[in-house]
Amino acid sequence: MKKIINDASQVVGDMLKGMLLAHDDLIEAIDNTNVVVAKDKPQTVGLVSGGGSGHEPAHAGFVGDGMLRSAVLGEMFTSPTPDQVLEAIKASDTGQGVLLIVKNYTGDVMNFDMAKELAEMEGIEVDSVLVDDDIAVENSTHTAGKRGVAGTVLVHKILGKLARDGHTLQELKQIGDALVQDIHTLGVALSGATVPEVGKPGFTLDEDEMEYGVGIHGEPGYRREQLKSSREISKELVEKLVKEYNLNETKKIGLLVNGLGATPLMELYVFYQDVVNELKNHNVEVVFKKVGNFMTSIDMAGLSLTLIDLEDSSRLDALNAPVHVVSW
Amino acid sequence: MKKIINDASQVVGDMLKGMLLAHDDLIEAIDNTNVVVAKDKPQTVGLVSGGGSGHEPAHAGFVGDGMLRSAVLGEMFTSPTPDQVLEAIKASDTGQGVLLIVKNYTGDVMNFDMAKELAEMEGIEVDSVLVDDDIAVENSTHTAGKRGVAGTVLVHKILGKLARDGHTLQELKQIGDALVQDIHTLGVALSGATVPEVGKPGFTLDEDEMEYGVGIHGEPGYRREQLKSSREISKELVEKLVKEYNLNETKKIGLLVNGLGATPLMELYVFYQDVVNELKNHNVEVVFKKVGNFMTSIDMAGLSLTLIDLEDSSRLDALNAPVHVVSW
Amino acid sequence: MELTGEQAQRWILCFQEKIEKNKAYLSDLDQAIGDGDHGSNMYRGVQAVKEKLNELEDPTTEEVLKTTAMALISKVGGASGPLYGSAFMQMAKTAKETTELPELIQAGLEGIKQRGKAELKDKTMVDAWAPVAEALTNGTFSNDTIDQAVEDTKPLQAKKGRASYVGERSIGALDPGAVSSGYLFTALVEEVLK
Amino acid sequence: MELTGEQAQRWILCFQEKIEKNKAYLSDLDQAIGDGDHGSNMYRGVQAVKEKLNELEDPTTEEVLKTTAMALISKVGGASGPLYGSAFMQMAKTAKETTELPELIQAGLEGIKQRGKAELKDKTMVDAWAPVAEALTNGTFSNDTIDQAVEDTKPLQAKKGRASYVGERSIGALDPGAVSSGYLFTALVEEVLK
Ligand SMILES: Nc1ncnc2c1ncn2[C@@H]1O[C@H](COP(=O)(O)OP(=O)(O)O)[C@@H](O)[C@H]1O
Ligand SMILES: Nc1ncnc2c1ncn2[C@@H]1O[C@H](COP(=O)(O)OP(=O)(O)O)[C@@H](O)[C@H]1O
Ligand SMILES: [Mg+2]
Ligand SMILES: [Mg+2]
Ligand SMILES: [Mg+2]
Ligand SMILES: [Mg+2]
């Protein structure tokens, strides 16, 4: 493992310190927590998200006016604890209640749920939206369900804008529940991710291997095979993703090409070009696009593609609205 | 080599296509060239930069209102040719002349010089600023001189703002020449970079090795040794960099922590925190900071630290001014 | 079979030792079918528990269980934090009424099931807790109960938690949460039931 | 020793073949003290030159040299593009006055020196061009002149171009630009001076 760090067991705290020093105009931390809060707190519903660390810029990079009110940073790849989430909820409430945006992992769901219970005991209105955009996992009652991955960032952005516009907690919950059903993501990895404290990658791929359908914590995918060209990868991802939509009539969609950490921007753009070409074979009109590192998996090489249904123009407006955050 | 690409020899063109598709609101390309031009062209001096590809988001990511008017993309790590630069100059001139921002490499200098000669023959006023911020190389008449690296991005930003404000070509040249003398950078690598067409890294480092003072094309550094902690690396870089400034009195400075491609944001923040701590031992006040990937070296793991003298408040204002570009 | 506060304290401190000793093993088990952090998650938790418990003087059973619950909830995170936390929280609540061991363990099991919604044979820690709770209640408990319960998670396919993502590939591996729960019950045998 | 248009064309096409054959070798030489692209840079250039030259019918010496210059300038990039480009551009300009070989090569050398500001013994292509130009002028030229000039770049420390970054470590390696220039002159021998 080669990393520019100090103590591997302190890496989340060290990163957080650096982040706060670098962005003291936008964000601050609650003392003695790993909770990042926006300095600017209008009287609106506060959005709270978070999860394990290692997905930078998610989630702290999306804290600020027009997106999240606060982000809770867990240990590397480990859901944060309820007391930390509770602190975030308390710091995010201005009387209009708090909406939790939670990625669908057993740990996150349970820890955020417990925090919600604790906050409600303190008289704060809390609701939550569960993001489960990763179609690599089957959504059956026999599994923990689909995982929440890069599409989560689009939920932050859209609900963040609507919260700023003054929508109520109930409205945001309702809009959010519908929204997450229209966001779908699929990822590929060229290498595993190395958690600093573990010191070795979660999985290893041969020099000519890739894996389709990996999660953002090195969860296994659905197929391992020889490294394909960008064109072939885009074909597979696009074909699987468009199946999630009804494309009898031309549908307005948005695209998010997300790097997993170690993949250069150059490759993301090469891939984006192939995605656009591939989509010409399908009944869609691309009205929004975003290319970059938004929800990473530490130093994993690879990328994910997210599609979002933007037939509802308020979603598109929300995506295009200006924000004051570190990493949108 | 593991990359998400198609034909290794076509990677620059493929990337460019993706970039244009992804950012068609901001940038376009001149037909049959690898020149990226801002869609928005106010009647001001046009700034042109560029160089070999592989440094994404540099330079095309900085094209737009308030930074560059156009960027010329060479082959991977290879200076673009004079005819391409000439096209950029022609597309960037609105009658107020064009300023070239050139990184100090023999190839870039000569190709941009030839383009300047050609443009002048066509009656366009052209001047240039040479950036040589990399203090890893000695500045002697017996070498090609210091190299231009990440600090170049700060030159784009500051001169871009001043050009938008209506400064003349002569003024910008003068301001730029003074500016580049106050910007200094030093980088470290944990791994080499792999040019797609070459297929193997330009140099290799052992699992426990790092190299101080590398360039952004895998140029060798000044020392190879065992991987150090973030704290130790920051100490060495800061100590070497502050020597370039007169710090008898407290000086206002700006910081740029730049990832070289494969290094996660997490590490950049850990390092930034150490840099700030280290600078407490020196007579500086940090008034501007930036952390992210701005001038990369394909998939190299590592980072660079840039210091800039911001005693002159117009520089700070220029850095803080809003811009419409892809990657600032 | 009442559990005194002093016994409860020794029980949990013994659990801490077992987790510390088997930290790497638990993570390796989790690496195979999860994300490889169960050992470090649990270790982070029981270290905090140890610290808190050592601050208590002559605690009641309820105090020990509640202190353990709070420390685990606030230090572990992941899936196991809320699950172990809920187990100890339910035990602490029950301890207000009774400190009978079978009732306590049964309450812990209920806490886990409520929080995690897992059923028997979903290949989770429930598969360790349920047979132990039952055997204690029926008076059929022996050391073998624990080993058997843990071992029985091997042939199961995971239906809950991170291991469910690997589908059929989870068959043949021990469930890490069941193994760590096994340590909890072995500690109980060594410190209380011996 | 006048250079006809037809000879000039054969000369440059022969140069193209040599670059094509030695592409990898030139890049390897550049990898050692530069950035490993001299072979692919030159190859990209001479491919374009070949295409353009094949379009010409009965060209004059000036046309061949100018076409070569333009194709190299617009296709090579890096350091060698402008340098070779300037060399051929100066040769083309001189060809308006005279097509005597010594004068042409001398003009090429001037083009390189003007563009790159390198002196003799800076370990650049100048170290191949200067001795050849001089020997042609003095009538002392032989095949050996080329080999010797190229070989003589080995002990030098680079003072210009990318190789200057490696300082003393450049000593002992051949300069890639001198080697490719050597091919240019060998092609001249084979096609014109033979
Ligand atoms: N829904 C659930 N109900 C009961 N136990 C569960 C459930 N989900 C996961 N577990 C237990 O949690 C263990 C994994 O814990 P851990 O690795 O610490 O958390 P994470 O899965 O978040 O990384 C599993 O081995 C399993 O025993
Ligand atoms: N200032 C200079 N004057 C003359 N020749 C030079 C100069 N700088 C570099 N060269 C030549 O260019 C060659 C390198 O060319 P090339 O590798 O194609 O370009 P780059 O250095 O930009 O990668 C060197 O081997 C040397 O012969
Ligand atoms: Mg985990
Ligand atoms: Mg080069
Ligand atoms: Mg785990
Ligand atoms: Mg070279």
Image (cartoon, coloured by chain):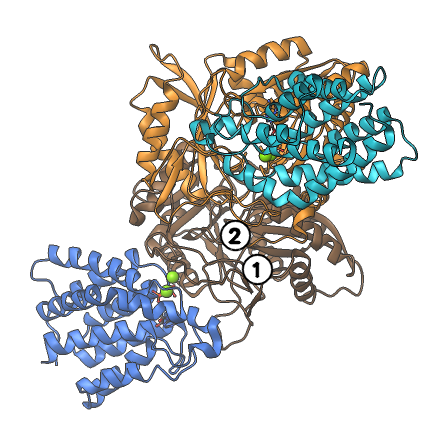
Chain colours: A orange, B brown, C cyan, D blue
Tell me the quarter of the picture where residue D179 sits: bottom left
The location of residue A26, given as percent across then percent down, is 71, 35
Residue for point 24% across, 68% down = D93
The location of residue B264, given as percent across then percent down, is 56, 45
**On what subunit does the disc labeled 2 rest?**
B
| Separation of marks 1 and 2 at Cα, in angstroms | 9 Å
The front one of A16 and A310 is A16
Query: For the C terminus of chain C, which image quadrant?
Result: top right
Residue tagged by mark 1? B187
Decide: few, some or many residues near mark 1? Use Cα within 10 Å; few <14, some 14-19, many ≥20.
Answer: many
Query: Is the shortest distance between ligand 4 and the CB of mark 2 under 8 Å?
Result: no
The front one of D130 and B51 is B51
Tag on residue B260? 2
Could one spot residue C193 in this view of the protein?
A: yes
* Side of D51 where D153 appears, left or right: right
Tell me the quarter of the picture where residue C115 sits: top right
Tell me which amino acid carries mark 1: Gly
The front one of B319 and D91 is B319
Tell me which amino acid carries mark 2: Leu
* B23 versus B266 height, above or below: above
Are the residues flagged by discs 1 and 2 from a single subunit? yes
Residue for point 35% across, 10% down = A249
* Side of B5 where C162 appears, left or right: right
